[in-house]
Amino acid sequence: MSPETLELVTDSLWPIVRGAVTGTIPLALVSFALGLVIALVVALMRLSKRRWLSAPARAYISVVRGTPLLVQLFVIFYGLPSIGLVIDPWPSAVVAFSVNVGGYAAEVIRAAILSVPKGQWEAAHMVGMPHAVALRRIILPQAARVSVPPLSNTFISLVKDTSLASLILVTELFREAQQIAAFSQEFMVLYLEAAAVYWVICLVLSAAQGRLEQRLDRYVAR
Amino acid sequence: MSPADHDVLEPPGGHGPPGGTGEPVLVVEGLGKSFGDHTVLRSVDLRVRRGQVLAIIGPSGSGKTTALRCLNGLERPDAGRVLVGSDVAVDFSRGASRTQLAALRDSSAMVFQHYNLFPHKTVLENVLEGPVVVQRRPREEVTAEALELLGRVGLAEKRDVYPFELSGGQQQRVGIVRALALRPTLLLFDEPTSALDPELVGDVLGLIKELADEGWTMVIVTHELQFAREVAHEVAFIDGGTVVERGHPDQVLRDPREERTRQFVQRLLHPF
């Protein structure tokens, strides 16, 4: 590596990391948190015996999973203004990503709830718990354990997908790299550097997933 | 152990007279239940007096477990009436309200075949869940009571242990303590020893017998005929969704009137 390239790498590292800290990471965290709330509601609707609750949930999941995230992002940021609804880049990204996470995570949460043995519902009802209390105190804590690995997948995918937000002018990790690359014409170096930063973030997340799984596994025979 | 230690095991409403000659605590009339086209209960009638132990026996698929589950509202019967004590009366033929079902559920407590302890909660938390969270009784009071009950069944030192660290017999004893802590009018047992290793069955049956001797009113679905003879005041043989025969354990198990009962008892006593 030539001294000039090395200097470019070190000089560009700060703007890229700043993009990650002020753009990528908060965008992913906020979208994931909102997405989980949507997912829980949609999963419970989907599990309901009442068709007027389960049908909209099915439709939501189908649309979210059946259309590209980039298209969803463009509809919200470039499409909605034509019907008079203008949303800033950051909120647009949050809406698109949380709606998207909501669709995928809903199926994860639904499967996790179904994986809890029926006897747990019965024992909860036996001690007198109404449905909602049984769900909150007995079923969801057990479902949480099962859903950590697949939800971690969803979260890691989301972190990388936030790079799409660069296309609706959100200043984040990849957009910083793009701008420096365009200026310096060193595309290979900058894009590899961006990739490396994403990778480091995801390594940290994987480690956190391992810790969380260990914690939630404390009441399970190994 | 002195009699004073038994205070927390006192059944609500006091001890029943020996042999269950008190007033009826559970009256079941014309209980019916179908799953789709499949009729599980045709018409089941049962009557249990305060302090009485009723053992329900019958072949698998006869509807005995379904009948028991109906008493706790885990299944919703299509027809029939269930009365518990003087306050709870549910007529399923007319459709039961949510409040009625809740009252029915509160009046009894069930011990499950597969224990169904909450795996993410410790032994003590399993026992406290109902009394503290649902019945909203003071935590300190219930904890003291729970620890005394756990001591009774020899599990006081396991209070902070998770269920997976316990043997089947220990888990089932926690299941029984969890049921007792709810202070039910009626204790329901669904084949409480069927999932246990043979050498662990004795402990659990011994505990159930102690509770019977203390005057708890109980309904026990079981395959242990010897146990039923020793503990129960009455045995009901259910087959094909109805009570085929009921009476004193010695009569039903030794000298059944009905041919179907005779065949069933013979098959259990002489499996091959």
Image: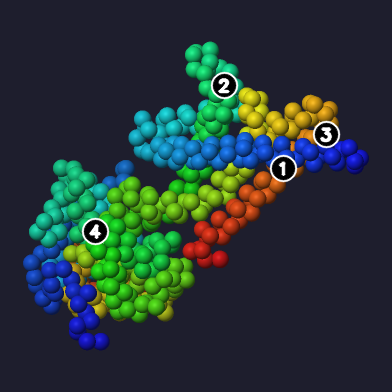
- Nearer to us in this view, A130 or B114: A130
Q: Nearer the viewer, mark 4 or mark 3?
A: 3
Name which of mark 3 and mark 1 comes first in the sequence: 3
Q: Is residue A180 above or below residue B238?
A: above
Cα separation between marks 4 and 2: 51 Å
Q: Chain of mark 4?
A: B
Measured in 3D between alpha carbons, the distance from the residue under mark 4 to the one under mark 1, in whole angstroms, is 53 Å
Question: Which residue is tagged 2?
Answer: A77
At horizontal 65% and vertical 50% (from top left) the residue drawn is A204
- Residue B100 % position (x, y): 18, 49
Residue A43 in percent (x, y) is at 44, 39
Mark 3: which secondary structure? helix
Residue A197 as seen in the image, left or right of residue B186: right
Amino acid at pointer 1: Val
- Given residues A200 and B23, the one toward you in this image is A200
**Residue at the extreme right:** A2
Q: Residues within 10 Å of mark 1 (few under 14, many from 20)?
A: some
Which residue: 25% across, 64% down?
A: B138
Q: Amino acid at mark 2?
A: Phe
The residue at the point 43 percent across, 62 percent down is B119
Spatial CA distance of label 2 from label 3 is 30 Å
Picture layout, residue A136 above or below residue B158: above
Which residue bears the numbered disc 3? A188
Q: Which badge, 1 or 2, comes first in the chain's sequence?
A: 2
Q: Residues within 10 Å of mark 2 (few under 14, many from 20)?
A: many
Kind of residue sitting beneath label 3: Met
Write down the residue under mark 4. Answer: B135
Q: Is residue A61 above or below residue B91?
A: above
- Give the Cα separation between the discs numbered 4 and 3: 66 Å
Q: CA distance from mark 3 to mark 1?
A: 14 Å
Same chain for labels 1 and 2? Say yes or no. Answer: yes
